[in-house]
Image: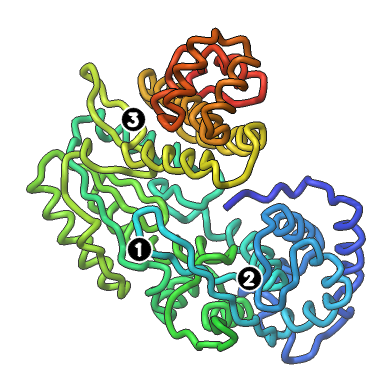
Amino acid sequence: MVAVDAGEGPNEEEGQVTMGLARESPPPGGTSSSSAQGRTDPGGGVGIMELVVESMNLRAALKRVQQNKGAPGIDGISTSSLADVLREMWPRLRQELLDGTYRPQPVKRVSIPKKGGGTRELGIPTVVDRFIQQALLQVLQRRIDPSFSSHSHGFRPGHSTHGAIRQALAYVAEGRDVVVDVDLARFFDRVNHDVLMSRVARHVDDKRALRLIRRFLEAGVMAGGVTFMRDEGTPQGGPLSPLLANILLDDVDKALEASGSCFVRYADDVNVYVRSARAGERVMARLRKLFARLRLQVNEDKSAVAPVSSRKFLGFTLRRFKGKARVFVAPQSLDRFKDRVRDETRPTRGKSLDEVIAGLAKWMKGWKAYFAIPECVVEREFPELDGWVRRRLRSMVLRQWRHGRVIYHQLRARRIKSHWCTLIARHARSYWHNSHTSAMHKAFPNRFFDKRGLPRLST
């Protein structure tokens, strides 16, 4: 989640939409009984739903949804069409939100492969529902987030994966070299609605807002043209889901804080750092009970009490290096990096070398920004990856040339000596071996890739 900058001005299109929405203000004087219920909080202030439909909040929500883009929901409306849709629908939507009668549409079910195997079910709301969720999120987050634990880092303004890693590193530096690594089984699919809503009600006193959240949770799921009703779970894909997850798991955070535990939580990943395996087993038993109270189940296959150096957390691993606790890129993350590069450099993709480099460049910059933090030791891994990526690209070129005669003439055109060209052409199908020869390094030197924008991880 991101903090909303109330000072951001709208672009021209957003301004036209939200200015039009702002003119739909509540009638002066009284209101109908249905829309008045919950309109103010017990202290006499403005109700949550009035804050949700406030012009500046809507402007920020519209901008965020358009920036995030994403696939259309079941109605096929894209984020690029959202402003036009709101111009037409907003007066009715606004009244329904204030009256507490708005009903979300079912979400579209999409299955995506998980990094560790299997699939993850995403529920994609319509863009209008995403807009309403985002507007509600911005109001609730300002109200609820300050009450969360400082050990919780997932999807919160001012928090990040890097902050979670640094906090974990501080615990390991204190000598807590054993981690209680807890993974929840299908967390977002198994959230109990009644348990969750009881926790939300601790922070939200506007009945209309509570009713709206409940309806978002209970909105059906459409798959293959058939709508299935849902009595548990909060589908990943909507802006509101991460905040609801943090609200539910805040009970666990508070219990761990009360016991003085040294822990870090990022979404449904919980790591507790202890000094011995025996202490870790006690903590694990307690966590099972805490999660059971929330009707959540620990994934025993992926959870463990183990040395810190043997576990992965947010793509990193922690261990002692030269007497100090340090952070490293996890082996699994390095493997996934190579899998991505292999996929991008497959010659059957039908892309030119420049097109492949352009695609890799954008992704590699983001990958480097994530892993190249000051605490992470990358002196060996990053140079090796740089060389490996360039070798993959040279190998891809040879595969595209394919035939010995083509390879010979292409290398000669790049001023490679004839006997080297002949040797490589004679073993034309030894692509990976030939990609590491001095002839290919001379034909495609490192500066060749630098000029075409391929980033270096090691600089």
Residue wearing tag 3: 328
Of 261 and 166, the residue lying toward us: 166
Residue positioned 16% across, 49% down in the render: 305
Which one is in front in this view, the residue at disc 3 or the one at disc 2? 3
**How many angstroms separate mark 1 from mark 2 (CA)?**
26 Å
Residue wearing tag 1: 251
Query: Is residue 44 at least partly visible in the picture?
Result: no
If you read the primary sequence from the N terminus, does the residue marked by circle 1 or circle 3 appear first? Answer: 1
Query: Is residue 193 at least partly visible in the picture?
Result: yes
For the residue labelled by badge 2, is the local secondary structure a helix, a strand or a loop? Answer: loop
How far across and how far down the image is residue 34, in percent?
72, 90
- Residue 423 vs residue 177: left or right? right
Of 134 and 384, the residue lying toward us: 384
**How many angstroms separate mark 3 from mark 2 (CA)?**
51 Å
Residue positioned 51% across, 68% down in the render: 122
How far across and how far down the image is residue 2, in percent?
61, 50
If you read the primary sequence from the N terminus, does the residue marked by circle 1 or circle 2 appear first? Answer: 2
Residue wearing tag 2: 43
If you read the primary sequence from the N terminus, does the residue marked by circle 3 or circle 2 appear first? Answer: 2
Circle 3: is it few (<14), some (14-19), or many (20+) Cα within 10 Å? many
How far across and how far down the image is residue 310, in percent?
21, 40
Q: Quadrant of residue 277?
A: top left
Q: Residue furthest left?
A: 278
The number of callouts visible is 3
Residue positioned 65% across, 34% down in the render: 358
For the residue labelled by badge 1, is the local secondary structure a helix, a strand or a loop? Answer: helix
Which one is in front in this view, the residue at disc 1 or the one at disc 2? 1
Which one is in front in this view, the residue at disc 1 or the one at disc 3? 3
